[in-house]
């Protein structure tokens, strides 16, 4: 087994052990989500030792513990798990946008929900 496939397997096992998503682990490790996907899938050709140390550090392991033949049974996440905000920070369109308008009206924030009068929104075509 190559080092890359060993790292990919270990990352997958530990992530499932702690019930984390790929996005949550990438946030904890301070790396990009797509970079983590490449690591876990084994598609990355090479990985720096500093990166392996950063990945192992999330679980409270040293590099040698992360790479040794037997994976430690007890691992602890050293940092607070941030909630995944990937899908909630961007402005939604469609029916989700309407739900945001309703909640803004309930809070009394009418400035964000006001719309232009119907006359200015639609124009009649003249030929």
Image (spheres, helix red, strand yellow):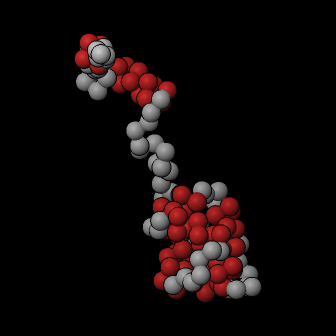
The structure residue drawn at horizontal position 66% and vertical position 85%, both measured from the top left corner, is 3
Q: Is residue 39 above or below residue 27?
A: below
| Depth order, front residue of 22/79 | 22
| Depth order, front residue of 63/75 | 63
The structure residue drawn at horizontal position 49% and vertical position 26%, both measured from the top left corner, is 95
Could you say which quadrant of the image residue 5 lies in? Answer: bottom right
Q: Is residue 74 above or below residue 107?
A: below
The structure residue drawn at horizontal position 47% and vertical position 65%, both measured from the top left corner, is 32
**Is residue 16 in view from this perspective?**
yes
User: Percent x, y for residue 98?
Assistant: 44, 24
| Depth order, front residue of 74/124 | 124
Could you say which quadrant of the image residue 117 lies in? Answer: top left
Counting the numbered discs, the total is: 0
Farthest front residue in view: 127
User: Percent x, y for residue 29?
Assistant: 49, 68
Placement of the C terminus among the 4 image quadrants? top left
User: Percent x, y for residue 42?
Assistant: 65, 74
Could you say which quadrant of the image residue 92 lies in? Answer: top left
The structure residue drawn at horizontal position 43% and vertical position 29%, both measured from the top left corner, is 97
Tell whether 123 sits left or right of 14.
left
Tell whether 12 sits left or right of 101.
right
Tell whether 112 sits left or right of 5.
left
**Is residue 72 in view from this perspective?**
no
Tell whether 33 sits left or right of 13.
left
């Amino acid at each position: 087994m190559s080092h890359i496939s060993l790292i990919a397997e270990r990352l997958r096992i530990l992530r499932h052990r702690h019930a984390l998503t790929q996005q949550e682990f990438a946030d904890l490790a301070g790396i990009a989500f797509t970079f983590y996907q490449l690591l876990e899938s084994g598609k990355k050709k090479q990985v720096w030792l500093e990166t392996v140390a950063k990945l192992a550090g999330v679980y409270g392991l040293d590099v040698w513990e992360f790479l040794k033949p037997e994976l430690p049974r007890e691992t602890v996440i050293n940092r607070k798990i941030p909630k995944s905000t990937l899908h909630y920070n961007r402005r939604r369109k469609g029916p989700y946008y309407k739900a945001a308008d309703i909640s803004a009206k309930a809070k009394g924030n009418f400035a964000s929900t006001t719309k232009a009068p119907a006359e200015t929104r639609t124009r009649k075509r003249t030929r």
